[in-house]
């Protein structure tokens, strides 16, 4: 691996921004589009991939943070229900459940608790964002438009063959 590739990989590991990392490793590159394209190629380099994977594994061991932990935390946020934290009693009064009665998962979904003008307010972490990140992780949706032309090419070839058959059999429409 070259020195520039190592600089790129180390910078990439900071925030996983390949374009920024490429511009640090190759400061002569001025356009973001150029840097983005070159960075994408760099990320496909086997030596760079291996180095990044090794460093990420070291980081995981050092911090003891795993993908499973992150997914569990996102799931706690994404699937939290308001009724986990409050109870509506007869007469319409709202009773906030004590944090001692909440599970660790339920507590991790809380962004903050404060005393506001109307009493105690509980703010939960962004459920929508957590579900979006979980969905991305699970590959439930793809933000990239992937156009594959072989099916179109095959259909065109089939149509051409069909019309050629009609033409040869003489059963097609008259051609002027």
Image (tube, grey):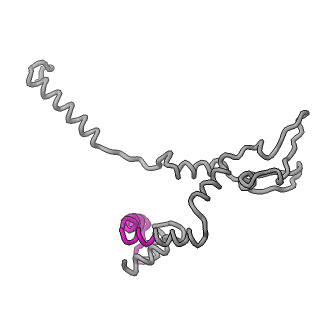
Question: For the point 67% across and 46% down, which residue is it?
Answer: 79
User: Can you tell which quarter of the image residue 91 is in?
Assistant: top right
Residue 37 in the image: above or below residue 159: below
Residue 18 spot, x, y in % from top left? 46, 67
- Give 38 or 27, whichever is nearer the viewer: 38
- Examine the rendered structure and indicate whether residue 99 appears above or below residue 46: above
Tell me residue 67's x, y (percent). 56, 59
Q: Which residues are magenta?
A: 28-52
In magenta segment, residue 38:
yes
Residue 155 highlighted magenta (yes or no):
no
Image vertical order of residue 67 relative to residue 62, above or below: above
Question: Is residue 174 rendered to the left or right of residue 54?
Answer: left
Q: Position of residue 156 (x, y in %)?
A: 23, 35
Q: Nearer the viewer, residue 151 or 96?
A: 96
Residue lying at the far bottom in this picture: please name it: 3
Apparent side of residue 76 relative to residue 3 in the rendered image (left or right):
right
Which quarter of the image is occupied by the N terminus?
bottom left
Quarter of the image where one finds residue 63: bottom right
């Amino acid at each position: 691996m070259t020195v520039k590739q190592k600089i790129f990989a180390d910078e990439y590991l900071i925030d996983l921004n390949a374009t920024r990392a490429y511009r640090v490793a190759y400061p002569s590159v001025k356009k973001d589009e150029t840097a983005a394209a070159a960075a994408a190629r760099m990320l496909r380099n086997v030596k760079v991939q291996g180095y990044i994977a090794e460093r990420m594994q070291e980081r995981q061991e050092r911090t003891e943070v795993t993908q499973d932990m992150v997914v569990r935390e996102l799931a706690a946020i994404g699937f939290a229900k308001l009724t986990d934290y409050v109870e509506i009693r007869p007469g319409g009064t709202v009773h906030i459940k004590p944090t001692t009665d909440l599970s660790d998962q339920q507590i991790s979904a809380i962004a903050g608790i404060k005393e506001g003008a109307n009493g105690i307010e509980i703010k939960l972490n962004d459920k929508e964002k957590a579900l979006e990140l979980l969905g991305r992780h699970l590959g439930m949706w793809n933000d990239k438009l992937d156009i594959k032309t072989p099916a179109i090419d095959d259909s065109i070839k089939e149509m051409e063959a069909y019309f050629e058959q009609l033409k040869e059999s003489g059963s097609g429409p008259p051609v002027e």
